[in-house]
Image (cartoon, rainbow, N blue to C red):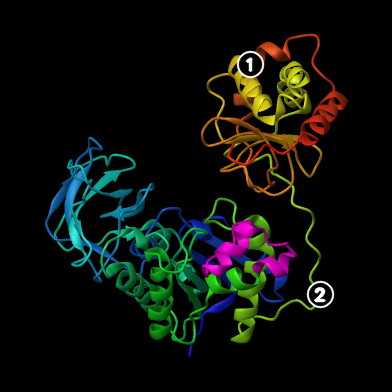
Amino acid sequence: MTVSRTDKVICYGDSQTSGFSWGNRLPALSETITEAIGRGVSGQEAGTVAVRQGGIVLTTTAACTIPTTGEAVDVPVSSSVAPCNIRFGASDMPVVLSGVRGVLTVIATADSNATTLWDRSLGAGTLRFTPTTAPASEVAVPSGTSFISQDVADHPEWAECLHIIWVGGNDAAFAGESRVTGVVSAVTAMVDRLRETVDEPRFLVAGRTTGTTNVEGTSSWQTAVDQHAALLAAFPDQTIDIWRHVRDNGLSILGVEPTQADLDALAGKTVPPSLTSDGLHYTTATREQVLAPYIISELAARGWTTPKAEVIPMPDYTPKTDWVAGAEVDHDHLNALEGALGGVIESASSAAQGVADLRAATTAELAKKVSSSTAKNTVYGIGADGAAYQYPVGASTKAAGSLAMRGTDGATRVGPATLEDHAVPKAQMDTALSAKADSADVPTLADFNALVARVTALETPPSGE
C-alpha cells in the first residue's frame, strides 16, 4: 500500500494560504518536513482551488478552434463535479487546452449584477480561454477535451505530497447552499485526485475563518460553523479547526493583553482584531507563532511528523525590503516629511488649541507638502531594524510602533501602527517629497525624535472628535 510522502507538504487554498510565512515555518518546527509549498491564491473559491489542484476537471462540451491570432475563445464547459463554485476571483486560471497554454476566465454578463455564464449548481457554463502565446497553426479542439491545470501539467509529483487544504473563505460570497456544499464537493474532488496517485492520502482540511466583525448571528459566522460541520462529517479524521484554535488561544500564546475590541470579538465568538492585520487575515506573528505550531501538532497527532524537541526562538519581526508591494524608505525622506510639519506642530501644540486644531492644521500642511499621489491609509515610521519605512494601514487602531498616518477618510492622525504592513514604493515617497528633499534645511533624526516626543505627549482629543 502506498501513502503520501510526509517530508514535503503542499498547501492549497485562498489568501489565508497565500500569506505563506506560516507554511515556511513548518520545516523549522518538524524533524521530518523538509519543504512546504504554498499554492494559495487570494480571492479564489473552493471550486477554483480544486481546478488548480486537479481534483475538479473542466471539459469542453462542444468543439472549438484556437486561432493563430491569439484571440480568446468562448467554450461551453462542464465540471467533473457539482455543485462547483468557480469565479476565479481577481486571478485567471492557468491551464493547458489541447497542448496550448493559456488562461481560463469566467465570463461576466453586462447586467448590473455582473452575473456570470456559469451555473454553480450544475457545474456547467461558458468559459473563456485566452492563449498565452498564439499557436503557429490553428488547433482543433474536439468536444470532450479536458483542460489541464498548469499545476498538474508542470508538477504531477505534487499529488504524492501531504496536502493541507484550507478553502471556503470566498464561497461565503455566493448565495444559497453551495457556500457549504460547494466546499465539500471541491475538497472531496481534491482528495479523490490524491487517491488516484496513492492508496492512502494524507491530508488536513479546514474551512472558512471569520473576520472580526463576523460575530455570532451573522451569515458569515454561520457559514464558518456550517462548513466546519460539513467537512467534519465528510472527513472526520482529517478536519481541523484553525478558526477556533486561533480565536480561542491566539492572544494567550502571543502574550497579548486583549483590548476592548478583542473582548467584544471574543464575546461574539469570532477572531480578536489584535490577531489580524486587516480584520480578517492573520498577522505575521499569529501565522508563525500560533498557526504553524498548531498545524505541526495536528500532523504529529496523526503520526505524520515529529515536532522538534527544541525550537530555535524566532527573531524579532523585521519588515522586508524585497516585497513586490514596496521598498525601504530612508531616514532622510522620513525626516523631510515630518520636518514639513514642524512649524505647524509648533504653532498648534498649545493646550488651548488642543489636538483637534493640531489635526486640522497638520492635514492642511500635508495637502501642501505631499503629492496627491501619496496613498491614504499610510504610516511613516521606524522599523524593527532601525530603518525608516512607509506602511499602508487600514485603521488607526493598530498596536504600538509608529507615528503619523492618514486614515481611511484621508484625515491625518498621529498614532501607532504595527510592523505587519507591507512597505509601499520608495518612488512614491520620492515624488511626494522631491521639493523638500532638495532643501538645505532637512531635519536631522534628532529633530524627528523630538517631534515624535512632542506629538505623543499631547492630550487625548475629547470624545466625539
Q: Residue at x 68, y 66 (%)?
A: 251
In this view, the residue in front, 211 or 47, is 211
> Mark number for residue 150?
none
Most common secondary structure along the magenta stretch: helix
Q: Residue furthest left?
A: 62
Say whether residue 454 is visible: yes
SS at circle 1: helix
Count neighbours of disc 2 (C-alpha within 10 A) and say few if under 14, some if 14 to 19, many if 20 or more. few
Please give left or right for residue 422 compared with residue 234 in the image: right
- Residue 327: image quadrant is top right
Look at the picture and state if 114 lies above or below 17.
above
At label 2, the amino acid type is Glu
Give the x, y percent position of residue 278. Answer: 55, 50
Q: Which label lies toward us, 2 or 1? A: 1
Give the x, y percent position of residue 130. Answer: 27, 44
Q: Which residue is mark 1?
A: 369
Please give left or right for residue 106 compared with residue 155 in the image: left
Q: Residue furthest right?
A: 446
Give the x, y percent position of residue 27. Answer: 68, 68
- Magenta residues (range): 250-275
- Residue 405: image quadrant is top right
In primary-sequence order, the first of circles 2 and 1 is 2
At label 1, the amino acid type is Lys
Q: Which residue is mark 2?
A: 310
In this view, the residue in front, 346 or 4, is 346
Say whether residue 139 is visible: no
